[in-house]
Image: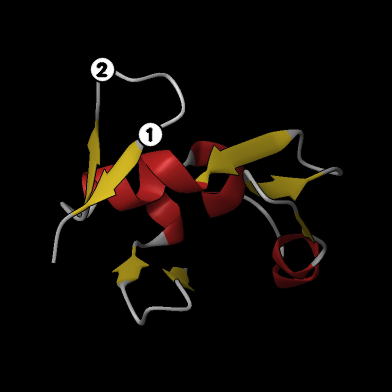
Amino acid sequence: MWAETQNGWKANYPFSRWNRLANATPAQRKAFVLSRYGIHWPELDEDLCFEGLFADAGIYKPSNAEDTIYYQT
């Protein structure tokens, strides 16, 4: 799975990182919903937030300000 921002920053991970996605069928993995906060698989009851995906990729750094996100390039 990969995610890319409008700025071109990319994060990718194998489905094996998440048990529900690893055990899902290809059709179940394709049945996702995007929101401004992340990706949701209703049938699998799985949610991944974009902040977490990009933080793990090393291009997101949380700040002390509640509504501020810093992206590292």
Q: Position of residue 57 (x, y in %)?
A: 22, 55
Indicate left or right for 15 with 27 as reference. Answer: left
Q: Position of residue 62 (x, y in %)?
A: 26, 31
Closest to the observer, 5 or 15:
5
| Numbered-mark total | 2
Q: Which mark is residue 51?
A: none
Indicate left or right for 38 with 67 as reference. Answer: right
Q: Position of residue 58 (x, y in %)?
A: 15, 51
Indicate left or right for 29 with 60 as reference. Answer: right
* Residue at x 32% of width, y 52% of height: 54
Above or below — where is 26 with respect to 33? below
Q: Position of residue 29 (x, y in %)?
A: 70, 63
Snapshot colouring: secondary structure
Between the residue at mark 1 and the residue at mark 2, the CA separation in whole angstroms equals 8 Å
Q: Callout 2, which amino acid?
A: Asn
- Residue 71 location, quadrant: bottom left
The residue that disc 2 covers is 64
Mark 1 packing: few (<14 Cα in 10 Å), some, or many (20+)?
A: few
Q: Callout 1, which amino acid?
A: Thr
* Residue at x 46% of width, y 28% of height: 67
Closest to the observer, 4 or 48:
4
Residue contact between numbered discs 1 and 2, judged by CB atoms under 8 Å: yes
Instruction: Label 1, secondary structure: give it.
Output: loop
For the C terminus, the quadrant is bottom left
The residue that disc 1 covers is 68
Above or below — where is 20 with respect to 14? above
* Residue at x 45% of width, y 72% of height: 5
Mark 2 packing: few (<14 Cα in 10 Å), some, or many (20+)?
A: few
Instruction: Label 2, secondary structure: give it.
Output: loop
